[in-house]
Each structure stands twice: as structure tokens, then as C-alpha cells.
Amino acid sequence: METSELLRFTLSSLVFKVPVLAVLIGGIIYSIVNYSKRPKVNRRVLSGLIILLAVEIFSVFLPLLNVYFYKNDAADSISNVVSYTFGFLLSIGFAAGLALILWAVWTNQTSE
């Protein structure tokens, strides 16, 4: 795969993530603006949203990793292990971000 094809592939992957990235960035901005109202809750929400944003950005690289292994004729077992490990770490990051947001919501409900 040439560099121009790889760039087009990366940009097309990012285009499909624009709505999610916009919501996450909007949530981060809203959390920063309203930080003084409930600092504990907003700190947890902000941490969760930043983790989810990082997961979304890094998830663009998972297909690129597969393309890299395919291009370099790497052994299938090595490419599968690396791809599955990267995907597993992204899943853990997503779960951690979501858990922080849910924790903030439940903490806010019980404290009032």
C-alpha cells in the first residue's frame, strides 16, 4: 500500500469518527465550563471523557496496524497477537472511561 493510499485510509477512518469525537470534545468543554458547580463529579466525568477520547483516537491506528503487518508480510500469528492485544487494551480503556462516567453519575445521585 502506497503512502497516499495509507493516508486516504487513515483519513477515511477519522471521518467516520467525527460525530463521536465531536460529542466527546463537547462533553469535555462542558465539564470544564461547569467545573466549579460540582468539582468531584466533573473531575470524574472529565477523566472518563478524556480516556474515551484517547481510545477513539488510538482506535484509528488498529486498522493501520493490520495494514502494516500485511504490507510487510509479517507472520500471521505475530500480527494476530499484536492486533488482538491492541484491541483488548482499547476495550479496557473504553470500559474504564465508561466506568468513570457512570461512577460520577451514581455518586451525584446518591450525594443529593
Image (cartoon, helix red, strand yellow):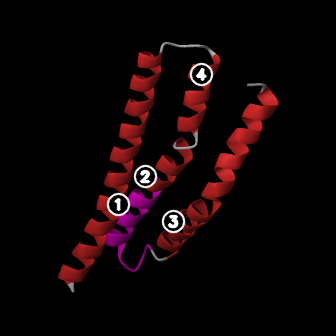
Mark found first going from the N terminus, 2 or 1: 2
Q: Nearer the viewer, mark 3 or mark 4?
A: 4
Q: How crowded is the residue under tag 2: few (<14 C-alpha within 10 Å), some, or many (20+)?
A: many
Mark found first going from the N terminus, 3 or 4: 3
Task: State the residue position of label 1.
Answer: 98
* Magenta highlight range: 35-50
Estimate the x, y position of residue 22 in percent, counting from the top left.
61, 65
Q: Nearer the viewer, mark 1 or mark 3?
A: 1
Q: Residue at x 65, y 47 (%)?
A: 13
Estimate the x, y position of residue 65 in percent, counting from the top left.
56, 29
Task: State the residue position of label 3.
Answer: 28
Determine whether the residue tagged by mark 1 lies in a helix, strand or loop: helix
- Residue at the farthest front position: 76
**Of 22 and 85, the residue lying toward us:** 85
Determine whether the residue tagged by mark 4 lies in a helix, strand or loop: helix
Mark found first going from the N terminus, 1 or 3: 3
In the picture, the disc for residue 70 is 4
In the picture, the disc for residue 51 is 2
